[in-house]
Image (tube, helix red, strand yellow):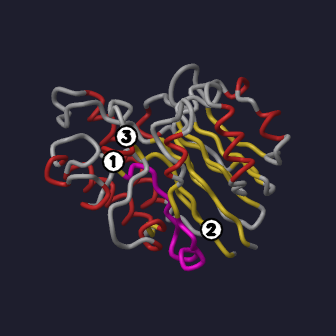
Amino acid sequence: MTFTLATWNINSVRLRESLVEALMREEAPDVLCLQECKSPVDKIPTEAFAALGYRYMVARGQKGYNGVAIFSKIPMEEAGATDFANLGHARHVAGRLENGVTVHNFYVPAGGDVPDRTVNEKFGQKLDYLTHMRDEFLAKPPEKAILVGDLNIAPREDDVWNHKQLLKIVSHTPVEVAHLEDVMAAGAWVDITRQDIPEGQLYSWWSYRARDWDAADKGRRLDHIWATPDISGSAHSSRVLRAARGWEKPSDHAPVFASFDL
């Protein structure tokens, strides 16, 4: 069975319903994971998505904040959700596909603007969230699993437009990268995007603040697709749909894709 998966921080699923529908029609991933849905589950436009073939959904939602959802053309059942760091936020949900693969969809806290937990509570929450993820994967080593989402960290030097300038900027600080590497090691996760595209600058997010985001190209790779070693070798065709960042009234993130032969 071959299936394609996409992950996208949509920055409001209701505000950008037409963009989700465009992606479903034009790219047609078998599984689409959305973050920052900013909607209660019962307000997500499921009927419109089902009409495009996405008849299965698992989700956690909140009014106006956070929120994660997985839509699938492939039969899928819920596989749980964890309130990491006990924040009371809708930031994780998991679905199990009919082939036995579990898909974890994460929206890791952004962490605010100051990379110091002593003066910025949000940064501390981000680090605690990652620590809880690490501990969960150490306690329950994942198998036949895919982890995707907006992890709000660009770990590699070539995951940002300027490594030296961003070392003290939240999302690329050494302490965040170390925490993310601990999460990866705990689950023996493989970075599928970089397995397929091992070299070169690669971004999935461009700030709204740039007058011309495309020309400035000051991006960061905040959105990730990982897999456990037992299925990582089946992954291929990774890509970032950069063009989506230029759609009308876009999210500041672009969708990231990978395919699996299982």
Name above or below for residue 153 compared with residue 208: below
Image point (36%, 37%), residue name: 212
Q: Is residue 231 magenta?
A: yes
Disc marking residue 240: none
Closer to viewer: mark 3 or mark 2: 3
Can you identify the residue that label 3 sits on?
213
Q: Amino acid at mark 3?
A: Trp
**Residue 256 vs residue 248, the one in the foreground:** 248
Q: CA distance from mark 3 to mark 1?
A: 6 Å
Can you identify the residue that label 1 sits on?
217
Q: Amino acid at mark 1?
A: Asp
Name above or below for residue 141 compared with residue 168: below
Element assignment for label 2: strand
Q: Amino acid at mark 2?
A: Ser
Image point (79%, 46%), residue name: 54
Q: Residue 166, position in %: x, y?
A: 19, 46
Magenta stretch in the rendered image: 221-238
Closer to viewer: mark 2 or mark 1: 1
Query: Label 1: how many residues lie within 10 Å, few (<14), some (14-19) or many (20+)?
Result: some
| Image quarter (top left, top right, bottom left or bottom right) of the N terminus | bottom right
Element assignment for label 3: helix
